[in-house]
Image: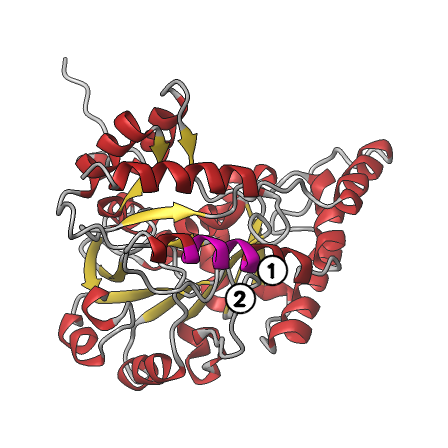
Amino acid sequence: MELTLNRAALGVETSGIRRFTALTRATPGACSLTIGEPDLDSPGSVREAVKAALDAGDTHYPPGNGYPYLLEALSQYEETSHSLHYSPDEIIVTVGATEGVFIALSAILNPGDEVIIPTPAFSLYGSATELCRGVPVALPTQAHDFQIAPSELAAAITPKTKALVLTSPNNPTGRVYTKETLDAVHEILRDQPIFVLCDDVYRELIYTEDYRSFAGFTDMRDRLIVINSFSKPWAMTGWRLGWCMADKPVKERMQLFHQYAVVSVPSFVQRACVTALACGTAPTVELFRRRRDYVCKRLAAMGLEFHKPEGAFYVFPSIQKYSADSESFCKTMLREGLVGVLPGVYFGTEGYMRLSYCYSDGDLKEGLDRIERFLKTL
């Protein structure tokens, strides 16, 4: 008797980000600048809210998509803060943005459907597409300052194209798509039966006045899926909470996968989510802006080329003058320089490395000192 497993998982590897972060942590004396997790604790008022919910006995099954009060708060927050108009019955509270990506792709993909993913990109998109029996199609952007070239996007579209993923600010580059880029993408897609997944998890961490989300193109509302998270702006990574929004027919298909995969997020954290939405993120933005400026100044002094991040908390310098093999380069730097950063190949783009600056000032200085010393040995 031969047992068989789901073939959709064949060829899908475990996260390179997680593997390399674990390798860094297992290296004695190493300094890690790998993971995208703020070094801040969740706001005190948010922690107090969850304690109060537990004390009040809020430990029973909640409604599957979220308590009505939280869905209403999210609807009002999106309208007030970002001029996005989604009613409470068009929102699902998810187990982080990761679940949002999975249920979105699960709801729209049929076997063989193609998903265009501008690279470099977070590896989840490609892996989730494959697990949903779709086909990821990379759209390289490094030759265009990490913006989408309209002619190349148009050429990537086939009769099998089902979706385009847009992440702005981008992980790993920190780049924000310009108005010109978004307008060009809209011009290409507005009359096509193609969904757009707007992964806006870094939307609150912006250092420019020119930010726009593709979610603002309301004439494509029936094909937009907007994904967000409490993790990054409110330092709530361990809470595993996010939300997604879509036109009601799409949202209703997504909620089937949500219901049968997780039922709901925990009941007692939901009041704390409302509290988080009322917590301003301006101090966090200024903290990361200062760290960004410090990191960029140091990297420039080392002679590394990069685009100054306009959002998120990553920088993606080129290492092409040292090596075309980013994984070997980063492993050597970890072994010899005792500092861990992530290889660009994990994001679908060789010749770069991703450095996260959501670490403490002391960790950033030490890590950058080690990178500088290592580069001088090459």
Q: Residues within 10 Å of mark 1 (few under 14, many from 20)?
A: some
State the residue in front, 257 or 338.
Answer: 338
Write down the residue under mark 2. 206
Labelled pair 1, 2 in contact (Cβ < 8 Å): yes
* Residue type of the residue flagged with mark 1: Val
Query: Mark 1 or 2 closer to N-term?
Result: 2
- Horizontal side of 291 relative to 52 (left or right) equals left
- Residue drawn at x 16%, y 70% as measured from the top left: 156
State the residue in front, 233 or 94.
Answer: 233
- Residue drawn at x 36%, y 33% as measured from the top left: 339
- Horizontal side of 195 relative to 150 (left or right) equals right
Q: Residues within 10 Å of mark 2 (few under 14, many from 20)?
A: many
Q: Quadrant of the N terminus?
A: top left
Snapshot quadrant of residue 361 = top right
Secondary structure category for the residue under label 1:
helix
Extent of the magenta region = 289-297
Write down the residue under mark 1. 285
Q: Position of residue 30 (x, y in %)?
A: 40, 26
- Horizontal side of 362 relative to 377 (left or right) equals right
Q: Position of residue 324 (x, y in %)?
A: 13, 47
Q: Position of residue 282 (x, y in %)?
A: 67, 62
Answer whether residue 360 is visible to the viewer in this image: no
